[in-house]
Amino acid sequence: MTAPAPTAAAYAPGDIYPRGPRERELCATAARPDWLYLGGLLALDVGAIWFGSHVSVKYSPDLALRMTAPVAIGLTWGATVGGAWLALPQCDSTWVGETPREGGVRATWPVALSLALLAGATAPIVAAIAVGGCDSNTPWCQGDLPASWTTAEREMHVLTAGLTGFGGALLPYVFPPRSWAAAREIDRLRIGADGHGAYVGYVAAF
C-alpha cells in the first residue's frame, strides 16, 4: 500500500517578504520603535519614583499609603523592563518569518519569564533607592529609612516591590506597544491564511 503524498506547504521556501498591502502596512509599523510607548514608560517611572520618595508618603501615619510606594515603583519598573524590548522593531521588510504547520516553535514565554524575573529582582533595589535618601541627622530618620518603620514593614516593602515588579513585566503583553501588536497580527494573518487542512499543535503566547 502506497503512502499518500504529503500536502504541499501553503508558502514557498523563498516567500520571505510581506504578502499584500495589509502585511506590508503591519510590517512597516512593526519595523519602527514605538517611541511613544517607551516615553510613556519613562514618564511612569519618573512619576512613581517621585511619588515614592516624597516625604508625605514616606512619613505618612497611614500604612496603606506608605505601601503604595513599592507597588507603584514595582509596577512601573516591571513594565519598563518587560515592555522596552517589545517596543523595539519586531519586523524586517526583507525577512518575515513563517510559522510552521506544526505550530509556533519560537515561544515567547522564556524571554517574558526571564525579563519578569529580572524585574522582580531589581524592583526592590529601585524602590529602596527612591524611598531612601532622608537626612540622617533628623531625629525620626535612621540611616536612609524612617525609624518608625518596623522590620516587618521594611521586609514587606522589599517583597511587595519584587512581586509587583514581576507582575508589571507581564503587563505589556496585555497592553502591547504598536510594534509588538503589529508583528503578532502578521502571525495571526498567516496562520489564518493556511487553507491546506488542519493540524494539531500548541502555541503559548502572552
Image (tube, grey):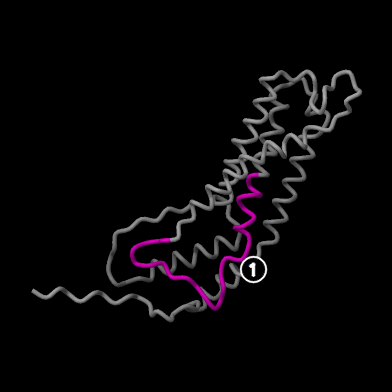
Q: Quadrant of residue 144?
A: top right
Vertical order, 125 against 58 (above or below): below
Q: Quadrant of residue 66?
A: top right
Apparent side of residue 197 relative to residue 181 in the rendered image (left or right): left
Q: Residue at x 59, y 46 (%)?
A: 169
Image coordinates for residue 11, horizontal then vertical, percent? 38, 77
Vertical order, 70 against 119 (above or below): above
| Foreground residue among 92 and 111 | 111
Residue 104 painted magenta: yes
Vertical order, 67 against 186 (above or below): above
Query: What's drawn in magenta, residue-wise?
Result: 78-105
Residue 158 painted magenta: no
Q: Secondary structure at mark 1?
A: loop
Residue wearing tag 1? 32
Image coordinates for residue 118, horizontal then vertical, percent? 61, 45
Apparent side of residue 132 relative to residue 157 in the rendered image (left or right): right
Which amino acid type is marked by label 1?
Arg
Q: Main secondary structure of the magenta part?
A: loop
Q: Residue furthest right?
A: 137
| Foreground residue among 24 and 59 | 59
The quarter in which the N terminus is drawn is bottom left
Image coordinates for residue 79, horizontal then vertical, percent? 63, 47
Q: Residue at x 35, y 71 (%)?
A: 194
Q: Residue at x 26, y 74 (%)?
A: 7
Label 1 neighbour load within 10 Å: few <14, some 14-19, many 20+: some
Image coordinates for residue 60, horizontal then vertical, percent? 78, 23
